[in-house]
Image (tube, rainbow, N blue to C red):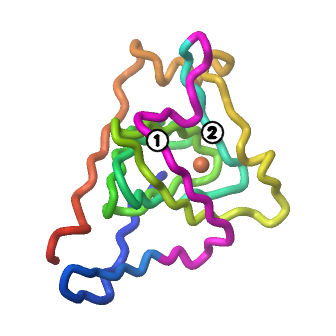
Amino acid sequence: MFELISYERFRDTPKVRFFDITIPASNARDLVYHEGPAISPHNTADDFWQFYLHPNQEDNLLALSGGRTFYLVNFQWEKSFHIVRLEAGKEILRIPPGTFHRSISDADGSVVLNQAVRAVETTIQKEFRVYNSKEIPKLYEVTSSKASPPKVHNLTPRWGHAA
Ligand SMILES: [Fe+2]
């Protein structure tokens, strides 16, 4: 299953807070800017959803600014389709390898830091393939409007609120 990981505030000064966001096993970092309501990966020209899936990489996603909504599908989970809302300062979203995922930013965009855990033998090309739901019947079936609705997860604010 995916996880929502909490992290610690370790120092408070007037108007400044420090957080330890370390993912100890992380060996790769990527930073993704969405300008405006971007969809990643983008839909096909005929408007089918597309997904990333990393065979050998775990994602650990922290929104640094803005908000982004993640669509997650994994056929090994009891409920295969989840929607998880990520906003700046909330938990880190851990997505295990083998999970189809796509995300949509809020109207004002978002910045997300990924502290990935990548198997050493893999390549970026292998990990960033895009999968078209039109071409994968099971994926299309579970995400279509006729399927049972996804489980939606909203997170609790962290930054900006005293503990
Ligand atoms: Fe990813």
Taking the image as shown, residue 31 lies to the left or right of residue 69, namely: right
The spot of residue 66 in percent (x, y) is 35, 50
Q: Residue 157: which numbered mark, if any?
A: none
Say if disc 2 is inside 8 Å of ligand 1: yes
Q: Which residue in the structure is indicated by mark 1?
A: 35
Q: Nearer the viewer, mark 1 or mark 2?
A: 1
- Residue 148 or residue 90, whichever sits in front: 90
Question: Cα distance, mark 1 to mark 2?
Answer: 19 Å
- Residue 149 or residue 87, whichever sits in front: 87
- Residue 132 or residue 77, whichever sits in front: 132
State the residue at coordinates (68%, 17%): 135
Asked if residue 131 can be seen in this view, the reply is yes
Q: Which residue in the structure is indicated by mark 2?
A: 52
Q: Looking at numbered disc 1 in the image, what kind of residue is underneath it?
A: Glu
The spot of residue 10 in percent (x, y) is 32, 87
In the displayed structure, would residue 41 be above or below residue 18? above
The spot of residue 89 in percent (x, y) is 32, 63
Sequence-earlier tag: 1 or 2: 1
* CB-based contact (under 8 Å), mark 1 and mark 2: no
